[in-house]
Image (cartoon, coloured by chain):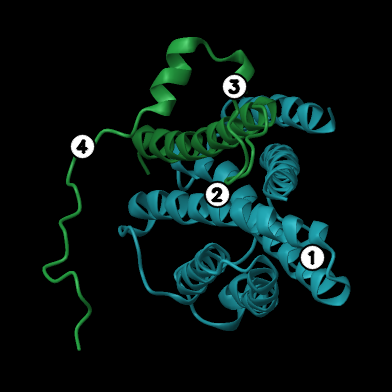
Amino acid sequence: MLTRWLGALAAVALAVGLVMGFGVAPREASQGTVQRIMYLHVPSVWVAYLAFGVVAVASVVYLWTRAAGADRVASASAESGVIFTGITIASGSIWGKPTWGTWWTWDARLTTVAILFVMYLGYLLLRAMIEDHERAARYAAVLGIVAALDIPLVHFSVLWWRTLHQPPSLIKPGAPTMPPEILAALLVNFVAFTLLYAYFVAKRVALLRREAEALA
Amino acid sequence: MPDHWGYVFAAYGLAAVVLVAYWRRLLRRDRELTALSRRPPTPPRGTTATTPASTMNQSDLEKRSQPASVSGHPRSKPPSPSPLP
């Protein structure tokens, strides 16, 4: 029931986010319309950070308590994280072509995000490859904690190294510097994507529980 | 900079396809698990037949009492009936 409500809320929030991004937020002066990809790209990477952070916390809880619920949360969150990281990379690449003149470049931000994506793909593969469920959960928990160390590298890469990618506009020290309409559209999309992530994780955790019950 | 609506639609369209595909995968798995839970439990191997003999008709019983027909590839006899020295 809660999952359905989350799904409905996420759908409404996504619709409002689209209206805000395409109807309320003004056309950006230097980049033009293509800047509207930001309302997809930035919330996606935020959800990817959140998802992998949840994987790390749930993995620590699993290693500490051996609670199957924590393992299911980690697994579900990793799946969603991989999907949102994929969307981040694809939308960033599409945004990069008209603004930077290239689909891809091996700069620090893009490379660290690609590493993050590959590590969590490996996490999902590891879970799928080991038949013994307890062993798979234990190995995946260790990998989930180690892979999360890449999140601060991704975020601060634009500050620590010289990159083609712009520095963070929102999650940074000090107040945001963007116009209020653009900031409002971005924040609504943050909420919408977070609700969508919560819906996906709740649904997947419920399915994993039912799968475990069916196998028992 | 000129407007690049094609790039904008490509980014949003791709994201929509991926998210909807994942959502549909979750729903399909949900339906599969629901169908699995509604199915009656099958008896484990090695136990008695699911159809009791009392409910079988005469032709069923006659069929079961006949030797099984040899079809496919029958196993050939060993070349030497006696064991090797």
Q: Chain of mark 3?
A: B
Crowdedness near tag 4: few (<14), some (14–19) or many (≥20) residues, C-alpha within 10 Å: few
Task: Locate residue A195, reporting x and y percent.
Answer: 75, 39
Secondary structure at numbered mark 1: helix
Secondary structure at numbered mark 3: helix
| Residue ranking furthest to the front | B82
Q: Which residue is mark 2?
A: A41
Q: Which chain is green?
A: B
Alpha carbon distance from label 2 to label 1: 26 Å
Q: What amino acid is at disc 4?
A: Ser
Q: What amino acid is at disc 2?
A: His
Q: What amino acid is at disc 3?
A: Ala
Of the numbered discs in the image, which one, if any, rests on residue B53?
A: 3
Task: Locate residue A45, reporting x and y percent.
Answer: 61, 56
Could you tell me if the residues under marks 4 and 2 are in contact, i.e. CB atoms within 8 Å? no
| Viewer-nearest of discs 4 and 3 | 3
- Both on one chain, marks 3 and 2? no
Residue located 36% across and 59% down the image: A100
Q: Chain of mark 4?
A: B
Residue located 67% across and 53% down the image: A76
- Rendered hue of chain A is cyan
Of the numbered discs in the image, which one, if any, rests on residue B71?
A: 4
Secondary structure at numbered mark 2: helix
| Viewer-nearest of discs 1 and 4 | 4
Q: Which residue is mark 1?
A: A58
